[in-house]
Image: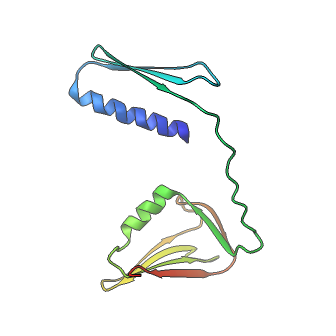
Amino acid sequence: MRWTWVVFCFVDLFSLFSPFTASPTALKMCYRGYGHPLMLFLEEGGVMTVCKINTQEPEETLDFDFCSTNVVNKIILQSEGLKEAFSELDMTSDILQITMSPTKPYFRLSTFGNAGSAHLDYPKDSDLIEAFHCTETQTNSRDTRE
């Protein structure tokens, strides 16, 4: 994931330069290995920019040790997909409800307000859902006015 983000930033960086000039933009990346910085040399229109990014070894992956005997339902969602799902809901509604079920609709986001109700249903094999473990139907709601 870290490299995907870095590559994404480079793509954004190059898009900043290309509309303003006809000269090509060149990037040279140098990495000597463990303990050394990642060196970036960006040349555009005769101007050289040098960037040194210090590196570090990743820490251990966090293991959230939820006591599995007390967990009724567990879902892991992709944050970008969840953000998109929330943008499709009626944000003027007073109540947000989240439902998980071992049968359809599996995962449902609902809003209820003066304009009516809206529901977004996701199957357990949706691209939004990374992991889905559901043993019983559970509904949680929150009054957004509070």
At which x and y percent is residue 17?
A: 28, 28
At which x and y percent is residue 12?
A: 36, 36
Q: What scheme was used to colour the molecule?
A: rainbow
Please determine whether, in this image, residue 77 is positioned above or below residue 93.
Answer: above
* Along the line of sight, the residue nearer the viewer: 84 or 140: 140
Please determine whether, in this image, residue 91 is positioned above or below residue 14.
Answer: below
At which x and y percent is residue 41?
A: 42, 19
Indicate the quadrant where residue 9 lies: top left
Please determine whether, in this image, residue 10 is positioned above or below residue 134.
Answer: above
* Along the line of sight, the residue nearer the viewer: 50 or 79: 50
Residue at position x 69%, y 45% in the image: 60
The N terminus lies in which quarter of the figure? top right
Please determine whether, in this image, residue 73 is positioned above or below residue 62.
Answer: below
Q: Residue furthest top?
A: 46
Indicate the quadrant where residue 69 lies: bottom right
* Position of residue 72 in the picture relative to residue 82 (left or right): right
Residue at position x 72%, y 65% in the image: 66
Indicate the quadrant where residue 92 lies: bottom left
* Position of residue 27 in the picture relative to residue 124 (left or right): left
* Position of residue 23 in the picture relative to residue 60 (left or right): left
Residue at position x 41%, y 61% in the image: 84
* Position of residue 93 in the picture relative to residue 31 (left or right): left
Count of labels shown? 0
* Along the line of sight, the residue nearer the viewer: 107 or 66: 66
Residue at position x 58%, y 74% in the image: 106
Q: Residue furthest right?
A: 69
At which x and y percent is residue 88?
A: 37, 67
The C terminus lies in which quarter of the figure? bottom left
